[in-house]
Image: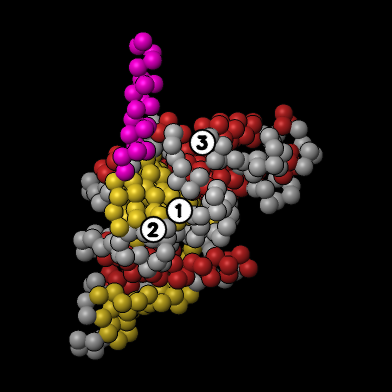
């Protein structure tokens, strides 16, 4: 009996887990606390810091992130901040060293951009389900945001 | 090893995807070298796309299983075990027992777990490894902060469907949007799930369960419950998110 008990407990727990769902409507966006302590990459190989290119009063601020050398090649992004919000992320450089890399980039760039836009406000470390890692992208992005004091 | 230079992020293209490793506390580049050497070895040994990989030669009958690296047999045994335990929904050899072998759905998570063990043995307590959207997270983001892990919204690239907070967790997501139709169509042709995210202690199991759950279109009863310690969050074509109650502790 002692040996049977855990099995019974596991089965009941299993059934409960399957039958008693929590549900909710899928959100259109998840936002959280404003990002304040997003980890930056001290070891990033960069050339030069982020540079603010334009800063009209009350208007749009564009900041170019540093070039981050990943094993795929250099990555560099520009961020557009307006009204205190991150409005857009533009990939200035993404690796295109071989056809496979091209394929990755074709899918990666929009996902990276959009995921960055939503995740930035939620202070996300990493995203599950996105097809590519966005480490290099976020390194350049974070440097640009840090430089903008965002 | 021996280098004074610390590194805390690296991304490498391997196993047909991008694998990223983040170590917030930093570690010697030599440790990350070791991690990626392992992953490249796994790729070369288990790639079904490389005709000269051991798995391809075994598949083609040009190599006997006893002449393969012992890890090949171990992986194939685990695949068979997973086939049985998922009620047949995870299948590494769809054309018969060890006929045309494709353990890829198991190998990625399994090799990332082993990569995590390399980091742990080197004294790295906090890290995440992201293999094409499947994540092994350990320790935390620093200063007592847990990792915050976003779940990609399956319909809107601009959104996350949920955010998880955890110190030690493996998170795997399967969905139609990932890589086209590499997973089976729904059993009855009417798809109910857009994506399935499974969390639990190790990524090999979480990844297999996410694949199986998506292939089964959410028909998880009763096999899923037999995997102790694993929970899931499924996003339906009705735009509803369903999750097992124990998942509550991770939902931010």
Measured as percent of width and height from the top left, residue B19 is found at 49, 54
- The one nearer the camera, B88 or A69, is B88
| Badge 1 and badge 2 in a common chain | yes
Residue B91 position by quadrant: top right
| Residue stretch in magenta | A1-21
Q: Residues within 10 Å of mark 1 (few under 14, many from 20)?
A: some
Residue shown at 50%/71% (left/top)? A94
Residue shown at 78%/38% (left/top)? B61
Would residue B198 appear left or right of B94 to someone viewing this image?
left
Which numbered disc flags the more N-terminal residue, 1 or 3? 3
Q: Residue furthest top?
A: A1
Residue B86 shows which numbered tag?
Answer: 3
Q: Separation of disc 2 and disc 3 at Cα?
A: 25 Å
Residue at label 2? Answer: B238
Residue at label 1? Answer: B192
Looking at the magenta stretch, what is its main secondary structure?
A: helix
Measured as percent of width and height from the top left, residue B203 is found at 45, 41
Callout 2–callout 3 Cβ contact below 8 Å = no
Q: Residues within 10 Å of mark 2 (few under 14, many from 20)?
A: few
């Amino acid at each position: 009996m002692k040996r049977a008990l855990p099995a019974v407990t596991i089965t009941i727990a299993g059934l409960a887990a399957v039958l008693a769902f929590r549900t909710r409507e899928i959100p259109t966006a998840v936002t959280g606390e404003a990002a304040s302590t997003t980890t930056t990459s001290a070891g990033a190989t960069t050339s030069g810091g982020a540079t603010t290119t334009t800063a009209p009063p009350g208007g749009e601020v564009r900041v170019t992130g540093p070039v981050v050398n990943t094993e795929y090649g250099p990555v560099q992004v520009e961020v557009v901040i307006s009204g205190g919000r991150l409005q857009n992320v533009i990939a200035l450089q993404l690796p295109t060293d071989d056809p496979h890399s091209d394929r990755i980039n074709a899918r990666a760039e929009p996902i990276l951009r959009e995921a960055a836009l939503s995740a930035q406000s939620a202070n996300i470390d990493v995203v599950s389900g996105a097809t590519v890692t966005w480490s290099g992208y976020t390194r350049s992005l974070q440097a640009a945001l840090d430089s903008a004091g965002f | 090893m021996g280098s004074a230079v610390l590194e805390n992020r690296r991304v490498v293209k391997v196993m047909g995807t991008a694998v990223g490793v983040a170590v917030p506390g930093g570690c010697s580049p030599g440790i990350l070298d070791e991690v990626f050497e392992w992953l490249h070895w796994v790729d070369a040994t288990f790639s079904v796309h490389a005709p000269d990989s051991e798995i391809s030669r075994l598949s083609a009958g040009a190599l006997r299983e006893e002449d393969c690296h012992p890890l090949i047999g171990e992986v194939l045994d685990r695949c068979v075990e997973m086939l049985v335990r998922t009620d047949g929904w995870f299948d590494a050899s769809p054309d018969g027992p060890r006929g045309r072998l494709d353990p890829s759905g198991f190998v990625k998570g399994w090799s990332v777990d082993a990569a995590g063990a390399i980091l742990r043995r080197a004294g790295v307590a906090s890290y995440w490894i992201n293999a094409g959207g499947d994540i092994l997270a350990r320790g935390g983001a620093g200063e007592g902060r847990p990792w915050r892990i976003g779940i990609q919204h399956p319909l809107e690239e601009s959104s996350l469907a949920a955010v998880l907070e955890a110190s030690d967790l493996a998170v795997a997501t399967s969905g139609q949007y990932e890589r086209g139709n590499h997973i089976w169509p729904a059993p009855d042709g009417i798809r109910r799930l857009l994506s399935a995210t499974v969390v639990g202690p190790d990524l090999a199991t979480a990844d297999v369960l996410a694949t199986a759950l998506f292939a089964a279109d959410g028909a998880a009863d009763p096999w899923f419950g037999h995997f102790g310690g694993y929970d899931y969050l499924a996003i339906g074509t009705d735009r509803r998110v369903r999750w097992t109650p124990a998942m509550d502790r991770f939902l931010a």
